[in-house]
Amino acid sequence: MVLPSDLKYTVEHAWLKIRGDKARLGITDYILEQLGDVNYIDLPEVGTMFSAGDVFTEVETSKTTLEITSPVSGEVISVNEELRDSPGNLNDDAFASWIVQIKLSDDTELDDLLTADEYEEEIG
């Protein structure tokens, strides 16, 4: 598996693409391979505030329903509306199919994120 090196990762299999005080969040190919085809995703509303550790979405797959937690605090400033009608886009290209974009409220939380190499070590 080739992981994009410009992203940050979590042990809970989320990825973040950080640009200034904003970040796009998604989930990794690794977890999607474990879970099967995505049938539904519950997208939050724009304006929703999250703290690190809060559930920001639920993903229903052919095998289970998974709650995805936010690794950072902030406000949802946009959601990937394409996923409402085509949640399977996550399976097609997990790293292009972001779920939400958040305006970050605490930059220090970024220090806890993993590099691509560190995430690869985690998943073995």
Image (cartoon, rainbow, N blue to C red):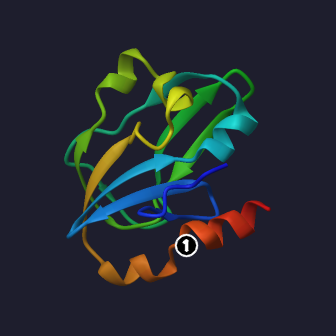
Residue 97 in the image: above or below residue 52: above
Residue visible at 64% across and 25% down?
61
Residue 85 in the image: above or below residue 109: above
Residue visible at 40% across and 39% down?
96
Q: Nearer the viewer, residue 104 or 36?
A: 36
For residue 72, which quarter of the picture? bottom left
Residue 84: percent from left, percent from top:
37, 21
Q: Nearer the viewer, residue 48 or 31?
A: 31
Residue visible at 44% across and 61% down?
7
Q: Return the residue at label 1.
A: 114
Residue 47: percent from left, percent from top:
19, 48
- Mark 1 is surrounded, within 10 Å at the Cα level, by few (under 14), some (14 to 19) or many (20 or more) other residues, namely some
Secondary structure of the residue carrying numbered label 1 = loop
Q: Amino acid at mark 1?
A: Leu
Residue 51: percent from left, percent from top:
39, 65
Quadrant of the frame with the C terminus: bottom right
Tally of numbered discs: 1
Residue 80: percent from left, percent from top:
30, 34
